[in-house]
Image (cartoon, rainbow, N blue to C red):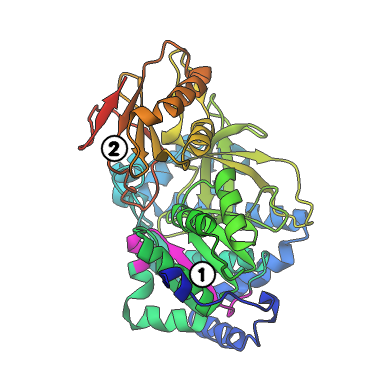
Amino acid sequence: MATVLDRLPPPLTRPVSSAGINWRAPIIRAAFRMQTPEVLHELDLIHSLERSPQSLRRTREERLERLLHHAWSQTDYYHEVLEHCGVCRNGRVNLDRFTDIPFLTKDIIRAQGDRLRARSLPPGRKGQKNRSGGSTGQPVRFWQDNVYWGVTIATRIYHFSTVGKEYGQREMKIWGNERDLRLGTLGWRATLENFIYNRKFEQCWYLPEQRILEIIRHLNEWQPQLLWCFRDGIDGVAKYINEHQIKVHTPAAVVLGGATVYPFMVQAIEKAFLAPAISAYGSREVGAVACQCRERRGLHIATQAHVVETIGTDERPVMEQDGELAITPLLNYAMPFIRYRIGDRGRLTERMCACGRAFPLLDELTGRVVEVLRNPRGEQIDPGYFIWIMAEKINNTTLKKGQIVQEEDNSITVNLVLEKGVSAPQATPHLNEIRKAMEVVMGTECPIRFAFLDDIPLSESGKYPYIVRRKTMGAPSSMAAVG
């Protein structure tokens, strides 16, 4: 008897590089020239800088100096802050004091509000409202201007080109944030932009089997040059493809965003699509910050548009060490974000990429700050270790999903979803393995309990909550606990 899988169209049988004439490219350039010329200006600049470290460094410093002067002269908050720390006095900027500027946090943005917003903008700039995804709680609201957005578009176009996709070629965006999809698909403007950009959208925040099959069918029918994907959604699709041994279209690359990408995800995605899984980093607050090239030995930082720092335990910048990321977008004059602690962790390196591009590297993204747990000795534990435990023990014939929660009293709850037809006693050997692996870093004195749930849903921002550090206790419904 025929199944749904039998009705899937065959995958691409020709190489993606021969996908026809890219007639949209000149149309896109003409549209940029008329509507957003800053996109083309930035693209030309990026290409002129990509092989020249000295020019790249000089451009970054010039843009940083202009941003600091603008923030000092046009915002109440930064006029006080930059005067106080000695970065800007009597209209003169001292870049040597940049790291003396206090960090910007989400709490400060909420508290200062309009005092962070520029009173006026340079000619040709217009501000518009935006807000963060709210993955760490309450969303942050802020302003950005059209030049910032043009630079973000140009940076993303450049990053995609380094992994095999030029603008105008087909791309499929498989995304897990409902708001992003709504804004990107509704209305005549979005419809026109998607037609010109040759882009199709697929939602992946809700993935029953039928939705996964629809994504696969649309992928095989449309055969895009590049997949631009929300990490958790495409991870789920890839696992389904591998489990059912489905042949799908092979794009030039699968670009992953939305959250930290871990090795076990890369392995599953590359096995499913037979294409390199490329990690990209950015956010609504700061735009397109960094992206891997085909070498995939670090993420190239768009330093013509950002200053990226990693902050160590002494609150000072560090290199070659894991730290909290502080990011300064250089082109948003509507509401300057200077040394913004975005809530992510990573590691900068002085090593340059073998591809020869001059952009410095973010060696690795290591997770969210809120995912960093502490053991009873007060030591910080890299969230990647716990996620590795989940990856090793989940997706077998017994355990379907897992989540690690550090409670208010610092004890650990491991939430688990069993495969259909599996009972709690059948999972006991896996629980013992998880406990032993966790005790290596948490110690035997840390209480560890297991709870079986009906499901572990995605967060409001569409991300899978592998690790939760919460302040209040509370048990989800339909839960059975095991000591």
The picture places residue 6, in percent across and down from the top left corner, at: 47, 73
Depth check: 422 or 93 in front? 422
**Mark 2 is on which residue type?**
Leu
Name the residue beneath numbered marker 2: 453
The picture places residue 161, in percent across and down from the top left corner, at: 65, 69
The picture places residue 327, in percent across and down from the top left corner, at: 52, 46
Residue drawn at (40%, 26%) of the image: 428
Which residue ends up furthest to the left in the rendered image?
A: 477
Q: Residues within 10 Å of mark 2 (few under 14, many from 20)?
A: some
Asked which quadrant contains residue 118, the reply is bottom left
Q: Is residue 46 visible?
A: yes
Name the residue beneath numbered marker 1: 150
Examine the structure image and report whether residue 354 is included in the region drawn in magenta.
no
Q: Residues within 10 Å of mark 1 (few under 14, many from 20)?
A: many
Depth check: 30 or 24 in front? 24
Q: Which residues are magenta?
A: 166-181
Residue drawn at (56%, 75%) of the image: 224
> Is 29 rendered above or below residue 43?
below
Which residue ends up furthest to the top in the rendered image?
A: 445
Depth check: 290 or 233 in front? 233
Cα separation, mark 2 vs mark 1, equals: 45 Å
Residue drawn at (65%, 86%) of the image: 20
Reading the chain from its start, which is encountered first: label 2 or label 1? 1
Depth check: 408 or 150 in front? 408
Query: Which element is circle 2 on?
Result: loop
Which residue ends up furthest to the front in the rendered image?
A: 1
**Mark 1 is on which residue type?**
Gly
Q: Is residue 62 visible?
A: no
> Is 233 rendered above or below residue 89?
below
Which image quarter holds the C terminus? Answer: top left
